[in-house]
Amino acid sequence: MTAVVEAVNLRKVYMLGKVPVEALRGVNLKVEEGEFLSVLGPSGSGKSTLLNLIGALDRPTSGKVLIDGADISTFNEDRLTDLRRKIGFVFQFFNLIPRFTALENVELPMAIAGLGKEERRKRAVKLLETVGLADRINHKPAELSGGEQQRVAIARALANDPRFLLMDEPTGNIDSKNASEIIELVERLNEEKGVTIIMVTHDQRLAKETHRTVHMLDGLIVDERVNKP
Amino acid sequence: MKPTDVWSYALSAIKLRKLRAALTTLGVVIGIAAIVALLSITQGLQTAIATQLQRGFATDALIVTAGGGLGADTGFSLLVNDTETISQVGNVTTALAIIQRVGYIKNAEGKARRVTIVGVDFKAYKAIYGSTFIAEDGADIPSKPENTAVIVGKRVSDPWGNGTRFCSKSDTVEVIWTNTTARPLRNESYTGMVVAVLQEVGGFSLGGPSDTSIYIPITQAQSFFRTDKCEIIIVKLKSDDKATIESTAKTIRSLFGGQVAVTSAAAVLSIISSVFSTMGLFLAGIAAISLLVAGIGIMNIMIVSLMERTREIGILKALGMKNRTVLLIFLTEAAIIGLMGAIIGVGTGYGLAELVVRIFANGGFGGGLRQGGQVAAANVVRITPVLTPTVFLGAIAFGLVVSLIFALYPAWRASRLKPVEALRYE
Ligand SMILES: Nc1ncnc2c1ncn2[C@@H]1O[C@H](COP(=O)(O)OP(=O)(O)O)[C@@H](O)[C@H]1O
Ligand SMILES: [Mg+2]
């Protein structure tokens, strides 16, 4: 069985002026189909950098990212863009378009992919129902709570039927009650729909809810633990 | 992304900052309006003058005046019977002498008006200026008039244009001339009879009938002014093609040893016409600079918008939007503003032109152009602004293109943003 995502000796060096910053120093990771993986680590350990490389938002300095076995570092800009449509990203700060309603925000990735109006509207409504926001579809982000905004973002990430979900501290900006609701939703997506999920967090308790946790420190994976089968 | 989705996305971005978009649009409106106003006024002026000229000028006529070089007074004068020599030149059908003096006409009530007294052969004059040397009541202009016959221009008969006649057909009038060669100066006069009032000519005329002149038979003019000299000889040609005009003009010039100037009405027409179009283009060029200023405004707004929306662009790219779609969205935003500004600008510009023309019609241009010289006489020129399809479409295209050009750089920068960096942007 090939991994959905595989990182091979992944390195990323940022230039901070003339000073090189080694954000990743040789990361190896494999994520199987249907897995729910959590990435734990202190701030600055390179979690977001890893997620951005896997999500085709950035290119590694060296090493490989394989998605369904294909080395994406050989992809040109257009193919990377196409790939991004098949990856669902959920950010810490939601990153919704403020002037759009919840519905329009969920429709956006489908519009970008060239889907027709009727079809994407129907699908967006269904997705918002899935995340429990059926009665909030015409609200703008400013009219929604943090937890609700993150649900919209999750619905948006699911819009184009992604190969896997990448979540960068999805609960980092919401209170703990809403946070556990979000995690329940994500678990349900993973269990019921078999969505592969990689979630960055620095909350130990949330990490324990996932199948497997990798620990990062200073740009390296230093520990790995299976929580439940 | 579908074109309709690109369009509505761009529109939603514009709607977000309505006041800003309105002000940016206003810049384009002002630039386009200035261009359209200037072009349609000059175009209208050109059309008005050209049609008036064509009526007052005969395009198959040459005008011969004394004096070969620029301002060189050689003492040479044309004689009335030089027409006989000129008639012999090939391609010439008629040659007609004109004697002109400034004088007065006094009506039965003893009131006098200043006029240009023009001595011509009525029959030949009618042959050359068949469309303007016509009586207002349609009656014939006598070909063999009495010596006392006087034909008056429309503005002489009806000076105020309201039907209050200074003199009418069949009236007895006194023709007065101040003899400036006599010492002391003295007024000389004779009693004439108005045999016809000309229909209104309007505009300019070069040698042709004018609304502010009176016409007397050439023989009468010769004896009244006691002269054999004439100011102008008008030559009617068999054809008005350029080659005929040029070769005949040359022959006539050499006939008088280069001491005469030969002007063709067609040449004057084309010069005046080209002067106006050059002037129009020049003014529109100045107006175009204001549109460039509007373009810089667009660029400025787009750069501000680009910075405000950096994060948004990052989101779009993370969701899989292509660079060229981002470019297209920004260009569409500029196109919407440019198109809107240009359409409103064309309307405003034309309205402005109408307004300006109306203001000037109440005593603007008329005064300036009324300086009738010895040869050319001018009346009020009526102008209607002309918005040609070329100017209409050109102005809209220009507004659009300027907006797009200035949006190109910000749009390109937006399209080149790296998703990760754009998402990190605060
Ligand atoms: N664009 C960048 N330019 C320079 N340094 C960066 C950039 N992105 C991340 N870094 C640095 O790389 C390291 C890892 O960052 P990040 O992956 O965001 O950590 P985490 O998400 O675990 O907090 C940090 O030291 C951070 O300052
Ligand atoms: Mg991070």
Image: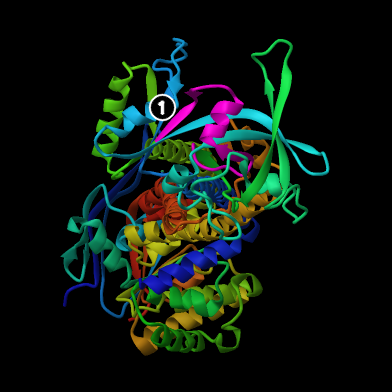
Protein chain holding label 1? B
Residue at (40% x, 45% y) in the render: B409
Residue situated in front as seen by the camera: A126 or B215: B215
Q: Which residue is mark 1?
A: B81
Residue at (56% x, 85% y) in the render: A133
Numbered disc total: 1
Residue situated in front as seen by the camera: B324 or B101: B101
| Residue B3: image location, x then y, percent | 37, 71
B12 is within the stretch colored magenta: no
| Residue A33: image location, x then y, percent | 26, 78
Q: Which residues are magenta?
A: B207-234
| Residue B371: image location, x then y, percent | 63, 32
Label 1: few (<14), some (14–19) or many (≥20) C-alpha neighbours in 10 Å: some
Residue at (33% x, 17% y) in the render: B258
Residue at the limit of the structure toward the right, as seen here: B109
Residue situated in front as seen by the camera: A167 or A126: A126
Q: Is residue B145 above or below residue A41?
A: above
**One can see residue B293 in this view:** no
Residue type pointed to by label 1:
Asn
Quadrant for the C terminus of chain A in the image: bottom left
**One can see residue B248 in this view:** yes
Q: In the displayed structure, does residue B103 sit left or right of residue A182?
A: right
Q: How is the image coloured?
A: rainbow
Quadrant for the N terminus of chain A in the image: bottom left
| Residue B9: image location, x then y, percent | 47, 68
Quarter of the image for residue B22 reads bottom right
Mark 1 residue element = loop
